[in-house]
Amino acid sequence: MARVVVDVMLKPEILDPQGQAVQRALPRLGFQGISDVRQGKRFELEVDGPVDDTALARIHELAESFLANTVIEDFTVKVEEVKAEAGK
């Protein structure tokens, strides 16, 4: 089993009000020196079988058509190593 991660972020030219709200709150919470915050989404997909070029192409298609609004969002697809959980 493999894990494929799709990270979705607003394009840099798109206003990110949630990120701005977090950025404005940080100094009040004692966190200094953070000049920008962008908020995004992370999808973790557990894939049965090998993650070959065909599987990655299908996941890219899924991300482009369903997980991201490509008019205002960019996305990346990457394979992560799945660590075995204790007792499994």
Image (spheres, rainbow, N blue to C red):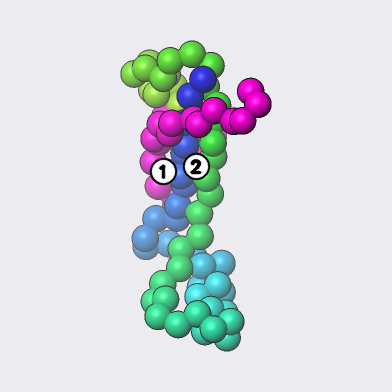
Image quarter hosting the C terminus: top right
Mark 1 and mark 2: span between their CA atoms?
A: 7 Å
Residue 24 left/right relative to 71 = right
Residue range of the region highlighted in magenta in the rendering: 60-88
Instruction: Residue under label 1, please give it.
Output: 75
The image shows residue 45 at horizontal and vertical percentages of 54, 30
Please report the residue visible at 43 percent of the width from the left and 15 percent of the height from the top: 50
Q: Residue furthest front?
A: 87
Please report the residue visible at 37 percent of the width from the left and 60 percent of the height from the top: 12
Residue sitting nearer the eye, 30 or 23: 30
Tell me if I can see residue 23 in this picture.
yes
The image shows residue 9 at horizontal and vertical percentages of 45, 52
Tell me if I can see residue 24 in this picture.
no
> Is 59 situated above or below 5?
above
Instruction: Residue under label 2, please give it.
Output: 68
- Tag 2, which secondary structure? loop
Residue 43 left/right relative to 71 = right
The image shows residue 44 at horizontal and vertical percentages of 54, 36
Quick check: is 80 in the magenta stretch? Answer: yes
Contact between labelled residues 2 and 1, with CB atoms less than 8 Å apart: yes
- Tag 1, which secondary structure? strand
**Type of the residue with mark 1:** Phe
